[in-house]
Image (tube, rainbow, N blue to C red):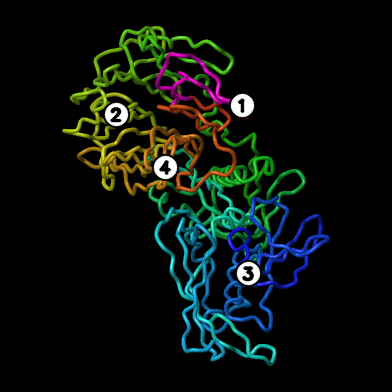
Amino acid sequence: MGADRANRGRRRPVRATAYAGIGAVLLAGCASMPDSGDMRDVESTPRQDTQVRVFALPPADDAQPREIVQGFLEALTSDDPNYETARTYLTGDALKKWDPNTSTMVLAEAPTPFTQVTGNEPSGGDYRYQLSGEKVARVDGQHAYTPAGGEYEETVHLTKVKVKDTQQWRIDKLPQGVVLGRSDFERNYRSINKYYFTSAAQSGEAGRVADPVYVRSQVDPVTQVVRDLLKGPTRWLNWVARTSFPSGTALRKGTAHLTPDEQNKLVVPLNAKADRVSASRCQEMAAQLLFTLQDYMPNGVDEVELQGSTGAQLCTLGEDQADAASRPGKGIEYEYFIDGEHRLVRLSARESTPTPVPGDLGEGVKQLRSAAVSRDEERAAGVSVDGSELYVAPLTSSGTVGEPLLRSAGATAKDRLTTPSWDGRGDLWVADRDPKKPRLLVLADGKGEPLEVRTTGLDGRIEAVRVAADGVRAALIVEKGGKRSLFIGRVEREADADGTTVSIVDPRSVTPDLEDVAAMSWAGDSRLVVVGRESGGVQQTRYVQVDGSTVPGPTPSALTGVEEIAASENENQPLLAHSADGIVRLAPGEQWQTVVKEGTAPVYPG
């Protein structure tokens, strides 16, 4: 539809119907009926108002094979909840077995049908089209998004069947799932964070972790989100996350739609699997729902009520009762960076002049080139100015620097220690880039003997590491052959009689289109801010999701010569960067402002 199929579709009359304040647009060949004047093509499919609904039309009695294929593809882009219109283009096994929920294949543009004819004449009752395009991503049956590449090629077979006493073309063989162009995907789907808990074995004490999925934005998204949450974490995250909902928990039979009432309270009726949960577990279940729904509609749900299979109330949870303090970045007091005298300094939102942190790291006892501040802002780790040594000291007036916890034997500063990172359980991470012994290390509770982290699946040298607040996901810049790429890996911990093993598992690229990633930082529960460059392009700063999808909305304004960037996991905090202009700050809705001319290594706690 839209830009994906401009000037390629059939032409049939359509009508637009408005009801209850909601506009419903019927599609056929991407034509639209204006209030006056001639019919004209829709030139694009921009992100539409959430109250606009788009529907397709069933096949015309005299539709030819190409029109049937085109009409079916257009129906896949509509807001038809169960793809009932798309099914009117099918017959036989295709009608019985086609499952649109298997997956969604996203292409750079809408799939292009190329004809492959069985026999010499299409009037013979047997016809075949090959669909082709360039793959962008695949959304699986759990609604998890994964970037994809290569060519898409699938075949659609048509035959003639008797419909309304006439012979008409219908599709009787087709690939499972849905296929559509990127612009239609961006219009029809929205990324939502489902929320689960990290297991104690993985993150010290249970914390929350975001699991992004894509739902159809106009097709009862609240109910979709709740159903997805109840099914549990997606496969990639399932190894390190848990749900408080008992296995098999689902919406009570007969529940069709979930809608908050006028007081922004949502009642969620559950089946018998949840009937006997304890009060504390019910509160955790309600918290998962509340966090998830507030991510989808921040001002739309203030309270959640869970009901059992008989309609009895199990528990309620309001926004004021939820553990809002568990939100990453909440309560952060300062921004930090290394000043021109190689000291760790800090700056609050109310200040315009940075001040040295309390203790040796702020007094320049050890000159630093980078640092990381613990999430409780009580300790800091600093890397010496030549990159060879790692120190940890309290951020108090009596906070002294002792012996280094780690030394690198790399021959040059670029071959030594990276900027460190604190995870949500208080462990300290750092990579040693010594070419003779490159390794990723973690220090339990920021002290003691460093433990080497297994990095199976990562091919190259780690240039930067940032561990999420949840402690179970790590972002890593990996260099190989002059190309630096960004990966997200799952952090898994196993303890046995011989000790603890920490591994980065199943790393996946989240910026496949960037040839050179210079810097990155976590910038939300499932979002990162990335500085990089496409092949042959200029440096740019953008937001990306941990699943590799793009973040809708404006990107940070352009900035010259960015070497380092920092963001808070509280998305309301400003961005910090080290650029050609020194240390600069970008507050929401504003332009970059210079903080100091001399300074490096900006960081938020974490």
Residue 386 disc label:
none
Residue interval drawn in magenta? 577-606
Looking at the rendering, in which quadrant would you find the N terminus? Answer: bottom right
Residue behind mark 3: 9
Residue under numbered circle 4 = 534
- Counting residues from the start of the chain, the first of labels 3 and 2 encountered is 3
For label 2, count other residues whose C-alpha is less than 10 Å away and answer few (under 14), some (14-19) or many (20+): some
Q: Nearer the viewer, mark 3 or mark 2?
A: 3
Q: Viewer-nearest of labels 2 and 1?
A: 1
The residue tagged 2 is 443
Please name the amino acid that badge 3 sits on.
Answer: Gly
Depicted 472 relative to depicted 252: above or below: above
For the residue pair 490 and 249, the one nearer the viewer reads as 490
Locate residue 470: give its quadrant. top left
Residue 590, numbered label? 1
Residue type at mark 1 is Glu
- Indicate left or right for 444 with 97 as reference: left
- Nearest to the observer: residue 11 or residue 323: 11
Q: Earlier in the sequence, mark 1 or mark 4?
A: 4
